[in-house]
Image (spheres, grey):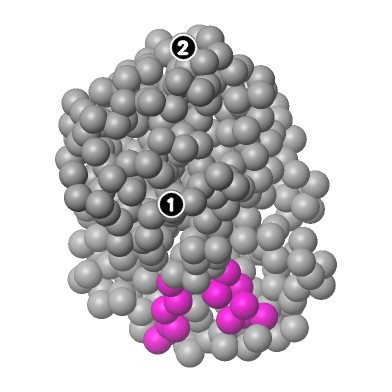
Amino acid sequence: MNQKHTRQLLGSLLVGTFVLGACGSGDDTGSSDTGAADITSTPDVTSTPDAADTTDPIATTATPEAGSDSTDAGGTITVYTGRHYGIEPVFEQFTADTGIEVRFTTGNDPELRERLIAEGVNTPADVVMTADAANIELSADAGILASVDSDILTETIPEDLRSENNDWFSLSQRARVIISSTERVENPPTTYAGVGDPEWQGKLCLRPSTHPYTQSLVASLIIAEGEARATEIVQSWVDNDPLYINSDTDIYNAVAEGECDIAIANTYYLGRLLTENPDFPVEIVWPEQDGRGAHINVSTAAVTANAPNPEGALALIEWLATDGQQQFADANFEYPADPNVEPNEIVVGFGEFSADLAAVRQLGANQPAAVGVLSATGYE
Ligand SMILES: [Fe+2]
């Protein structure tokens, strides 16, 4: 192969972090949430591929030569993950507990799915992880996930948070809520429809329509209210002339700095911001508390259909659902999928709320309709 490809292959054989592409529509790195700054390659990585390289499919013959210097009984697994914030120490703990080495590649969910499809039976990936329920369901539809039979997973992960045929499992919950300035707003909206009240004209920030978080939120509106009513709601948001910002962190900062008064965003970003500044002047408003509950999306994991090491893959997912559950959720201030595991104390401080868990498994099926609603309403 050419030099570029060889260099990438070398990179892929090391245990480390490589950010795939620009992550513009990815999970934890919105356009500028953390950017490429979370490339935390292990010290011996001297050939970290640049972003352009990493969009190429990796060599189909990338069999794990790395095994020669990681000869423990556990072997090695390869993970493609769209949910990357704080993931490296979690994988390190898994390796410490099980002896199984983890190699991982990060990217946004659609990008990693396309890569898995392109690689087909030659994929090196054993596990795929996403930051969005619809995207893992679309992977299931594409035939690139394996159904697994695991009592550990079916007993630990609530039924609403795993696919019907057990080809994907949620590992944590991510609530997408209304956020509001603590300095300028006295009565924030308490429903997603309320965000479209004319009172918020010119005072609203939203994530663009191309982002999976937006598409899944609108899918949840369709599931709860029907497509016609969901279209009315989204139209009312658009009519409020929102400022579109493709980064939840930037959305929080826009509310703090007065560019908008209210917005819709994921709660875990506030966890990060409060860690840096306990007085950050933005609060969470739990929506739909008299009805279905706040929109919940999930971080998921699945064994790939062509996994070279399916046993190792399942071991990782079972570990993440059990021994590693708290660490996985806490790494990104998310809510654990296992209701018996306590969230991080900052997250507990966001208060109790009711959650729209019933929609989670239907987000994928409603994603095309959501894209249609966003397009029809002129949502940018
Ligand atoms: Fe995110």
At 75% from the left edge and 44% from the top edge, which residue is drawn? 344
Give the magenta range.
240-256
Q: Which residue is at the front of the view, 32 or 96?
A: 96
Question: Is the residue 337 above or below the residue 235 in the image?
Answer: above
* 23 or 152: nearer the viewer: 23
Would residue 319 appear left or right of 246 to someone viewing this image? right
What SS does tag 2 mark?
A: loop
Residue 126 is situated, as x and y percent measured from the top left of the image, at 37, 26
Q: Quadrant of the N terminus?
A: top left
User: Real-space Cα distance between discs 1 and 2?
Assistant: 38 Å
Pick the residue in front: 88 or 4: 4
Residue 222 visible (yes or no): no
Q: Which numbered dot is residue 129? A: none
N-terminal of the pair, mark 1 or mark 2, is: 1
Give the x, y percent position of residue 292. Answer: 51, 47
- Quadrant including the C terminus: bottom left
Q: Identify the residue under disc 1.
A: 47
Mark 1 neighbour density, 10 Å: few (under 14) some (14–19) many (20 or more): some
For label 1, the SS is loop
Q: Amino acid at mark 2?
A: Ser
Describe residue 92's horizontal placement relative to residue 164 as left or right. Answer: right
Inspect the magenta stretch and tell me whether residue 255 lies in it. yes
Q: Is residue 141 above or below residue 177?
A: above
Residue 150 numbered mark, or none: 2
In x, y percent, where is residue 321? 58, 25
Q: Please rate how many residues cluster around mark 2, counting C-alpha atoms within 10 Å: few if below 14, some from 14 to 19, many from 20.
A: few
Q: Residue at x 20, y 50 (%)?
A: 2
- In this rendering, the answer to whether 263 lies above or below 370 is below
